[in-house]
Amino acid sequence: MSALSDDTLRKILIQIQQTAVQSQRALTACQQQTAAKQREKRILEITIQEISSLEPGINLYKGVGKMFMMVPRKEMEAELKGQEKELSDDINGLNKKAKHLEKQFNDAQNQLRDIFHHAPRQQ
């Protein structure tokens, strides 16, 4: 049976630990980004609801820098719905990334657990 040297085993353990830590940090950042995008999406949904509840003849204005420009209702709704779709796509992408990072973290944890479980007991 070939045994790994202590130095090689130590390097492997450090690499697995680093992978676990990096995965956990990236997962946390991904979750924070997802939460921010979900808040933005909710604000857009509320804005769209408010605009659709207004009477058809009411003027709508859009902030551009330090001024406001009157925008046709259809254009405003189309722009908001486009932003909402873009945020939904971003959220879906972040959720996929989070699942991948979670799996990567769990794999690293399992590898560490297996190494310590199967390591010969030193007395």
Image (cartoon, rainbow, N blue to C red):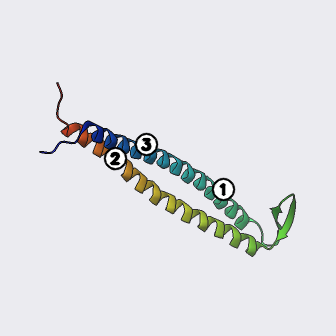
Residue kind at label 1, given as amino acid type: Ile
Q: Residue at x 68, y 67 (%)?
A: 80
- The answer to whether residue 86 is above or below residue 5 is below
Q: x, y percentage for residue 26?
A: 49, 49
Residue kind at label 3, given as amino acid type: Val
Local secondary structure at mark 2: helix
> Disc 2 and disc 1: Cα gap in Å?
38 Å
> Does residue 104 appear to the left or right of 65 in the view shown?
left
Furthest toward the left, the residue is 1
> Does residue 76 appear to the left or right of 4 in the view shown?
right
How packed is label 3: few (under 14 Cα within 10 Å), some, or many (20 or more)? some
Task: Read off the residue under disc 3.
Answer: 21
How packed is label 1: few (under 14 Cα within 10 Å), some, or many (20 or more)? few
Task: Read off the residue under disc 2.
Answer: 108
Q: Evaluate if marks 3 and 1 touch, with contact meaning CB atoms under 8 Å apart.
A: no
> Disc 3 and disc 1: Cα gap in Å?
34 Å
Q: Residue at x 24, y 39 (%)?
A: 5
Local secondary structure at mark 1: helix
Instruction: Please tell me which of labels 3 and 1 falls first in the chain.
Output: 3
Dot label at residue 43:
1
Q: x, y percentage for residue 40?
A: 64, 56
> Does residue 122 appear to the left or right of 43 in the view shown?
left
